[in-house]
């Protein structure tokens, strides 16, 4: 019997592997003709991991002393970053922006999940077209609902009847958020969290239990929204959560008939506020009827083409670059 700890046979078999696979060998053991190879799959895509096993088999089957080959590809679970999307007040388009940011990040190759943390006013199921789905539980944890856009998600809209009022006290809201964030997110590296407006129970629970890697602040250009956005910035900074930057939403309206651009909410206010607060300005999303129409239909503009999609992808690229620095 060949000793499983014998270095000679293992080294001989490893030398038969292509160099790129040999460098990934965590362990290789040969016992009674049975070769067991464990490879490091870190950084490999799902398709690449799938191709590894037949490549190893092709290299080792038929080798001296080898009757069968067993291959395991092990990859460390990616570190998950929570990216909070907040605003100081409602009505600034934060949920639409959160959904499209998640979809745009997925288009850039990121593994993204989306949590609708607005427990009493959920909207993400409508925005991503998953209103008719219900999550299941596995080992006492929720399994996120799959969306058509490559972004798994969880929302109270998946757990309640359409149109049902959700009047919960703080502890119940905190419990729901905990269930969402502790769900089976598997390989998701970024969890985008669409926060409710303001600085209440949901925000405090998240900051205390699930400290975000960073926060994106959404505002429209007018002064009132900017005042409230500053409060949201203050909350994150006091909790030592880095603010990725500020987004100016509903910035500029192009008339579909004459093409003239007007600024019903003002212009440049969020960029000026970001500069005053010493924060990065991440970009502008236009006030566009196509964004409203597609969002209501459960078809996020970021999944398509055209200037609306380009605006969200440009934003996602800046956020993605920031995440690469942490």
Image (cartoon, rainbow, N blue to C red):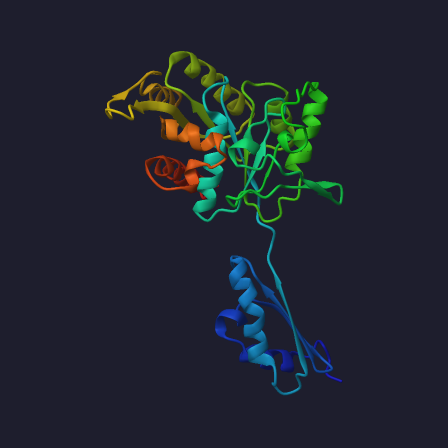
Whether residue 309 is visible, yes or no, is yes
Is 150 located above or below residue 169 in the figure? below
Residue 120, position as x, y percentages in the image: 63, 22
Kindly give the residue lying farthest to the top in the view shown.
Answer: 224
Quadrant position of residue 82: top right
Q: Is residue 160 left or right of residue 1?
A: left
Q: Is residue 91 left or right of residue 65?
A: left
The quadrant in which the N terminus is found is bottom right
Whether residue 323 is visible, yes or no, is no
Q: So how many labels did they put on this image? A: 0
Q: Nearer the viewer, residue 57 or 2?
A: 57
Residue at horizontal 64%, vertical 26%?
205
Q: Is residue 259 left or right of residue 4?
A: left
Kindly give the residue lying farthest to the front in the view shown.
Answer: 257
Is 183 located above or below residue 280 in the figure? below
Quadrant position of residue 14: bottom right
Residue 9, position as x, y percentages in the image: 64, 82
Is 286 located above or below residue 181 in the figure? above
């Amino acid at each position: 019997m060949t000793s499983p700890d014998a270095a000679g046979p293992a080294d001989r078999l490893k030398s038969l592997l292509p160099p790129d696979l040999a460098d990934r060998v965590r362990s290789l053991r040969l016992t009674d003709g049975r070769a067991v190879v464990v490879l490091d799959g870190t950084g490999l895509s799902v398709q690449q991991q799938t191709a590894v096993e037949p490549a190893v088999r092709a290299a080792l089957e038929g080798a001296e002393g080898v009757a069968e080959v067993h291959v395991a590809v092990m990859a460390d679970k990616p570190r998950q970053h929570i990216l909070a999307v907040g605003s100081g007040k409602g009505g600034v388009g934060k949920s639409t922006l959160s959904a499209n940011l998640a979809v745009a990040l997925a288009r850039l190759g990121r593994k993204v999940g989306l949590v609708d943390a607005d427990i009493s006013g959920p909207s993400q199921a409508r925005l991503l077209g998953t209103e008719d789905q219900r999550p299941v539980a596995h080992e006492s944890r929720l399994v996120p609902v799959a969306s058509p856009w490559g972004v798994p998600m969880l929302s109270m809209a998946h757990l309640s009847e359409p149109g049902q009022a959700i009047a919960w006290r703080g502890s119940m809201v905190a419990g729901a958020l905990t269930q969402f964030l502790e769900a089976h997110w598997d390989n998701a590296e970024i969890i985008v969290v669409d926060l409710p407006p303001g600085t209440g129970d949901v925000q405090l629970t998240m900051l205390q239990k699930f400290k975000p890697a960073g926060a994106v602040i959404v505002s429209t250009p007018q002064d009132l929204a900017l005042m409230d956005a500053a409060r949201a910035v203050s909350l994150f900074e006091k909790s030592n959560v880095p603010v990725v930057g500020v987004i100016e939403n509903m910035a500029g309206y192009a008339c579909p008939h004459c093409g003239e651009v007007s600024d019903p909410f003002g212009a440049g206010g969020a960029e000026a506020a970001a500069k005053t607060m010493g924060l990065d300005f991440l970009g502008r999303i236009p006030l566009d009827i196509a964004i409203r129409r597609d969002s209501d239909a459960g078809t996020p503009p970021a999944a398509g083409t055209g200037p609306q999609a380009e605006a969200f992808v440009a934003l996602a690229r800046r956020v993605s670059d920031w995440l690469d620095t942490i």
